[in-house]
Every structure is written in C-alpha cells, then in structure tokens.
Image (cartoon, coloured by chain):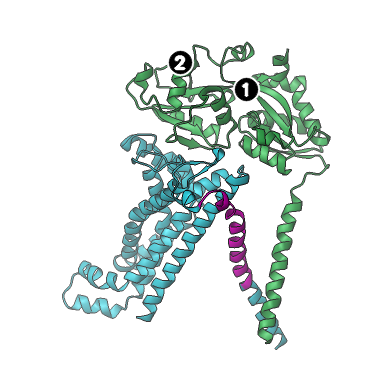
Chain colours: A cyan, B green
Amino acid sequence: MKKEKLLRYVFLLAASVAILTIFLIFVFMAVKGVPLFFKVPLTGFLFGTDWSPTKGHFGAFPLIVGSFLVTLGAVAIGGPLGIAVAIFLSEIASSRVANFIRPTVELLAGIPSVIYGFFGIMLIVPLVRTFVGGAGFGFISASFVLAIMILPTIAALTEDTLRSVPKAHKWGSLALGATEWQTIKKVTLPSASEGILSAVILGIGRAIGETMAVLMVIGNAPIIPTSLRDPFSTITSVVALDMSYASGEHQEALFALALILFIISMSLVAMLRFVSRQRSTR
Amino acid sequence: MAKTTAKLISLILTSVILIASVAGCQSGGNENGTGRVTIVGSSTLLPIIQAASEEYVKDHPDAKVDVQGGGSSVGIESTISGTAAIGMCSRELKPEEAEKGLFKTPIAVDAIAIIVNPDNPVHGLTKEQAMKIFSGKITNWTEVGGKDEEIILINRDEASGTREAFFKLLMGERDFLKKAIIQPGSGQVRSIVGQTPGAVGYLSRGYVTNEVKVLALDSVRPSISTIRDKTYPLSRTLYLLTKEKPRGPAKDFIDFVLSPGVQKCIVGTAYEPIIEVKK
C-alpha cells in the first residue's frame, strides 16, 4: 500500500512539472515582456509598421502579418496534400503499399528543421528564383518548405479519423451503387470532417511556431510583403535572429513577441479542444 | 485532506527543483582561471581568431580556447555579461555600450568590399551611387551603366558589426532600404550574391572568394595598399574586447594575437595587421 501511495506522488510530481513549466514560462515572458508596454503603447506595438529595434521603433505588425501569411501559404499547400495522402493511405492503397508509404511520410516528421531549411535554400529558392524572379527568398519558398513540414502531421491525423469512420457506412454507400470516389466525397470525408479540421489546426500550430527552416528561406526583411518576390519576416524568425544580442527595450520587445506567439498557440489549442468536444458530444 | 497536502508538497518540491536549476545556470557561465578562454562575436574576425587559437593551443597545450561567431553585438553583450572572456568586434562601440567600460584592443584593420554577382558587367561605383543603391533610390543596374536587371539587395542583420560600420562609413544619414534580404552571416551573403543575378551585398575583404566580384568604390579597389594609404573609403578597425584591462589567460591570448608572428599571418587572410598601420 505504501508503495502505491508513493508512486501516486511520483506521477503527480511528474504531472505538476509539466504544468509548472508552462506556468513559469508564461510568467517569465510576461515579466520580461510587459514592461515594454509602459514605454510603447500596446496598439503601437501590435499595429505599428516600423520594426527597427536598434533605433527604438517597435512596430510588430509586419512580423505578425508575416507569421500568418506563411502559415496560410503552408496550409493552402500542405492541407490538401496531407488530406489527399491520407485518403490514398486509408481508402485507396492496398495494405502493402500503405505500409510502405506510411512510414515514409512519418519519416518526414522526424527530419530536423534545419535540414528542411537547407533543402529550401539549395533547391526551392533557386527554383523560385528561376520561375518567379527576384532572389527566390520569401512567400513561395517559405510556404513550400512549411507545407512539407506539416504534411506528416496532417496526413497521419487525417488517416486516423478516416479509418475511424465505420466500415458499414462505406459499404452501405457502395451497395447503393455509389462509386468509390462518390463514397469518399459524400460519406467518408463529411463524417470525418471534424477530425480533419483538428488535423489542420495542429498543422497550423506547427507552421506558425516553426523557426529555423523559415528563417533560412524567408529573407528576413522587416516589412509587409507587397509581392511574391518580397522578402519578409515572421515572429519566430525575428526572435531567433535577435535574441543573441538584444538588450534593454529590444529584449523586452522580443519577449513581448514571444508572448503574442504563446497566446496564438494557446488559442489554437483551445480551438482544437473545442472542435474535439463538439465531435464527442455528437 | 491528505490529497491536497500531497499536491502542495509536490508543487513546492518542483518549484525548488526548477529554481535550483535556474540558479545553477546563472553561476555556471563565469570564466575562471583554469586557462579556458571563451571568445564570441564578429563573424568578420572569426577566421583569423580561429586560426590564431589553433596556433595558440599548440604553444600552450594546457589552454583551451572556444571561438564562436554570432555578430559584433553578440560579442559586446557576452563580454558585458561575462559569458565570454573576450568579445570580437568589427565596429566602434555605441555610446551606451562604451559606458559599460569595455577595454578595446585593436588587432587588425579591414576593408568592407561591395560585391556583386560575377556575371555583372559593372566594375565600380561612386560612393554616391553605392549609397543610392543601398537606400533603394537606384533599383536597376542600367542606372549605373550595367545591363537591364533589377538590383537585389542583400543586407546583414542588425547584430552585424559590418552592417553598422558600412552604415557609418557610407550611408551617412540615409537608411538602408527595408525591403532588402537580410542574412545573419558574411558567408550567407557571399553565397547568395554568388548565385543570384543582379544581387549586390557587402562583406569583409577577408571573406571575398572568386564566387563573387568586388566592385571598386570611387575607382579604388580594396587592397592592403589602399587600406594602408587610406584611399579606400570603407576601412575599419577590428577589436578584441575585454571587460577590463586584459589579464590572466585572456591577456595571454590577446598578446599572442598581437605578436609579430600572428600579425604577419593576418596579412595572408587579407586583413591589414595593426602593427603596420600604427607606424
């Protein structure tokens, strides 16, 4: 009995480490970041368009826009692709083919992001330079690299939900004379839609937080891009580039940026919980 | 009741563990006198200091020297905070940094070269043209006698001493074009300029290879002799920084870098040794 009780505490301790870490990270970022807002008004920080930290201008709007832009681009490419991969694996491929392709896709998730960045610089950036012009850094390169990075997340989760659709539904549809594609489109996908949405949200979470790969291919100019050829920045790329030397207000501004990212990630987690709760109450 | 106490105890325990580890980090970064020297900062200085440290360790088998890049601002910050014994710096200190009482030892003089893609027919610019290009007033190579090609600017990040020095020496009051691509190191600037038609950037002369083409500025090309007679407009002094007057292992290392043998080697890496400039 004593051992049972002791073990309970051990596991409770482990769980509280996780909670306390999140709590401490939040408090730490708030303590370090919030003082900035006594000098720079919150609206000026969120909507100012001039980010020149060494001159004392902290307008983070271009960076926030940048983060959302690349995420949008990544999901626009990686979302359909990931869902298509999942449909192929769960509905079309024979189990032998699927068992070969699935681990390959999963392997994509295990590749370190700096290697994706390197791949982006060596392959995607020159291709974009040739076909679109400019230097090749910017929206297209960053979206492509991120799309490949979120592909395994979206594909794996979507496949799980597609497989959880009861076989009887599909058989019913096929028995009524629907073709395989009609069944996928009208029966399987709609009943898995909330699961797919969760998969996409997780993909968004991965894309918006990605740092190294994006930093290497985006060009890092602190502006709102006006063309596909413009280099720009994201919240994460700026924090990573500046953290090593920033001091004073500049450092506070980076913590404030991190805080914004933290809040965005938390909202995504909340959204995810909301979506999956909707699913379970059905 | 027992459950809440248990929760409380574990919470306190975890906080103790976390606080202990945070405190451990803060005291762990200090340098001590065992002959280990950490050197951090300018990527311009990195190659010469790296080479010097390898020689230094050969002469002093019990010494350990760690050299890392990151940019001049990183070197300054790390020297002030004490995480590095020596900071490498390729620009002058800003007033707020100078206030912290850092000790500067000049070790070499360097020229900043303006580089373009090797396929670019342009051979040189005036200072005025260069300034207009980097501030975005001139956007096509035809305006400076080249072919009809968009100018693609490759700039450095704000931690860079090369950027700061280039700005001070060339740009005066004018700002850099914000739309320029920003790269965190001289090596990246070189490889992008080398691959991209129409690209222009700048870097320390020590980084120039045949991947890129160096432009003359006001008809003067950067070289040892034009640095020496001060005709090349973009030259600057490179420093090693210490928190106070160098002593212990840091002093040993700086003295080694200033010794005639090492200073002679610096010429081989395309920088101008400080001893000769002083004369």
Residue A232 among those drawn in magenta: no
Q: Which residue is mark 1?
A: B236
Q: Position of residue B265 (x, y in %)?
A: 69, 21
Q: Tell me the amino acid under the disc marked 2.
A: Gly
Quadrant location of the N terminus of chain B?
bottom right
Q: Residue at x 59, y 53 (%)?
A: A35
Residue B143 in the image: x percent, y percent? 36, 19
User: Which of the two marks, 1 or 2, is nearer to us in this view?
Assistant: 1
In this picture, residue B242 sits left or right of residue A148: right
Labels 1 and 2 touching (C-beta < 8 A): no
The residue range painted magenta reads A16-41
- Front residue of B247/A145: it is B247
Is there any visible trace of residue B117 in the rendered image?
no
**With respect to residue B150, does A109 lie above or below?**
below
Q: Earlier in the sequence, mark 1 or mark 2?
A: 2
- Residue holding disc 2: B124
Residue at the image position 49 percent from the left and 49 percent from the top: A45
Quadrant (top left/top right/bottom left/bottom right) for the C terminus of chain B: top right
- Number of marks drawn: 2
Secondary structure state at the residue bearing disc 2: strand
Q: Residues within 10 Å of mark 2 (few under 14, many from 20)?
A: many
